[in-house]
Image: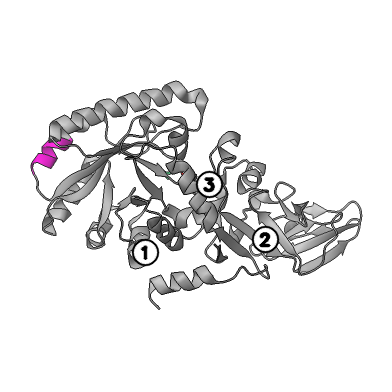
């Protein structure tokens, strides 16, 4: 089967009742989020969909195809192998690779992927390989560090960059970009405004030095929502597409696209002084009922969710995880829930969100959703 046919087949599969652990992807919610975020943009601002890490733990190929059909302008992944997978599945829109390594530059070019270049070493390595591969005006993206201190050239590298660019015909700057450090945190408003001002000044200098105008972009999801003055020519959204806006207010306008569900494999009655799970981490001081579920840390529910921190819902009622999370299983307390072996269990959905669950383990939605491992079967709701 061609990737396109495979995609269509998966898309038309009717929604199964959970009989095993499933990650259900709601494509209508994805469309809603895409359209909501687009509605925040000026008409000519381009939309780059960030589909790194399997589209934040959902499924990069199907999500990217769906967004390509909705006319997303650009895609971004973190690494070259993620971009190759998208090309193999038939994605034809430009793909920015945010953090490529030089060892993969030849294959990056072969797959028409566009590198982010962030320091002298990687810029020179790319120019050398693009020249050796007889490239002409190969699109590259120059990244500037305006305060995140993660990747990027500094403002006083502009002369160096432009001298390198003037000396070659192998590459051409498709965009100049930077990344905000705290776009979701309005207490850091002043810092963010300084990043934006610094990016404006840097891009002005670059444009003057290279004498043409590449695209400019800076905003992630929270930047789109909080800093309309920084949308420039394109915005880059990840988490918003998947349904989280990093604030209660913004979450209301977005819909989580992923539901993680499973079933009850077995119910146990635990007597007083018995223990549950490895290391006897839970000890009972009364009679209780537990359910064992076929999902564990190898599926992405980390050990930090164990011992009463995380919970699932069964027939709408909360069931805390008790004892340690195992590799393939968790045990939950169902003492006050009327339920049977085989019943459906929700780990997160649009009501009991991944963000809520993540907060119980002192982390963020990004970490929980991207952790859902490839072992969990993905199904699509249209
Ligand atoms: C991951 C990433 C994004 C997407 O950020 P969200 O907060 O998920 O919208 C944008 N830009 C860069 C450089 C990134 O690494």
**Front: mark 3 or 2:** 3
Q: Outermost residue toward the front?
A: 43
Q: Which is more N-terminal, label 1 or label 2?
A: 1
**Front: mark 2 or 1:** 1
Q: Which is more N-terminal, label 2 or label 3?
A: 2
Q: Position of residue 27 (x, y in %)?
A: 52, 58
Local SS, label 3: helix
Give the residue number, with chain letter if any, for mark 3: 366
Task: Categorize mark 3 by other alpha carbons within 10 Å: few (<14), some (14-19), many (20+).
Answer: some
- Above or below 16: residue 366: above
Local SS, label 2: loop
Q: Are marks 3 and 1 in contact (CB under 8 Å)?
A: no
Q: Which is more N-terminal, label 1 or label 3?
A: 1
Q: Position of residue 200 (x, y in %)?
A: 28, 27
Residue 25 in view in this figure: yes
Q: Are marks 3 and 2 in contact (CB under 8 Å)?
A: no
Displayed quadrant of residue 273: bottom right
In the image, taking residue 154 as reference, residue 336 lies left or right, namely: right
Q: Is residue 83 magenta?
A: no
Q: Position of residue 127 (x, y in %)?
A: 16, 49
Magenta stretch: give its range: 161-167
Q: Position of residue 300 (x, y in %)?
A: 58, 57
What label does residue 326 carry, if any?
2
Q: Does the numbered disc 3 mark a residue whose Cβ is under 8 Å from ligand 1?
A: yes
Residue at figure coordinates x 91%, y 56% from the top left:
287
- Above or below 376: residue 193: above
Give the residue number, with chain letter if any, for mark 1: 85
Q: CA distance from mark 3 to mark 1?
A: 22 Å
Displayed quadrant of residue 272: bottom right
Local SS, label 1: helix
Q: CA distance from mark 3 to mark 2?
A: 22 Å
Residue 296 in view in this figure: no
């Amino acid at each position: 089967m061609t990737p396109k046919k495979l995609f269509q087949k998966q898309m038309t599969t009717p929604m199964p009742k959970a009989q095993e652990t499933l990650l259900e992807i709601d494509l209508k919610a994805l469309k809603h989020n895409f359209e909501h975020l687009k509605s925040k943009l000026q008409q000519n601002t381009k939309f780059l969909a960030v589909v790194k890490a399997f589209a934040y733990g959902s499924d990069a190929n199907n999500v990217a195809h769906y967004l390509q059909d909705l006319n997303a302008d650009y895609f971004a992944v973190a690494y070259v192998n993620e971009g190759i997978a998208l090309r193999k599945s038939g994605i034809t829109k430009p793909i920015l690779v945010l953090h490529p390594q030089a060892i993969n530059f030849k294959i990056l070019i072969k797959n028409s992927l566009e590198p982010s270049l962030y320091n002298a070493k990687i810029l020179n390595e790319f120019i050398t390989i693009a020249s050796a591969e007889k490239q002409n005006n190969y699109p590259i993206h120059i990244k500037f560090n305006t305060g995140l201190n993660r990747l990027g050239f500094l403002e006083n590298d502009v002369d160096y960059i432009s001298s390198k660019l003037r000396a070659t015909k192998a590459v051409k700057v498709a965009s100049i970009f930077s990344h905000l450090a705290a776009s979701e945190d309005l207490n850091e408003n002043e810092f963010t405004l300084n990043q934006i001002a610094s990016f404006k000044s840097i891009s002005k200098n670059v444009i003057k030095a290279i004498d043409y105008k590449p695209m400019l972009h800076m905003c992630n999801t929270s930047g789109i929502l909080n800093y309309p003055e920084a949308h420039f020519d394109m915005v880059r959204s990840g988490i918003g597409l998947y349904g989280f806006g990093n604030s209660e207010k913004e979450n209301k306008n977005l819909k989580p696209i992923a539901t993680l569900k499973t079933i009850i494999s077995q119910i146990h009655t635990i007597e007083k002084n018995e223990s549950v799970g490895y290391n006897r981490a839970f000890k009972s001081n009364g009679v209780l009922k537990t359910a064992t579920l076929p999902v564990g840390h190898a599926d992405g529910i980390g050990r930090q969710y164990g011992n009463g921190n995380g919970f699932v819902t069964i027939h709408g009622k909360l069931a805390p995880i008790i004892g340690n999370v195992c590799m393939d299983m968790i045990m939950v307390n169902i003492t006050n829930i009327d339920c049977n072996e085989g019943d459906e269990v929700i780990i997160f959905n649009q009501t009991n969100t991944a963000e809520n669950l993540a907060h119980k383990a002192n982390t963020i939605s990004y970490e929980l959703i991207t952790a859902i491992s490839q072992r969990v079967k993905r199904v699509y709701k249209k």
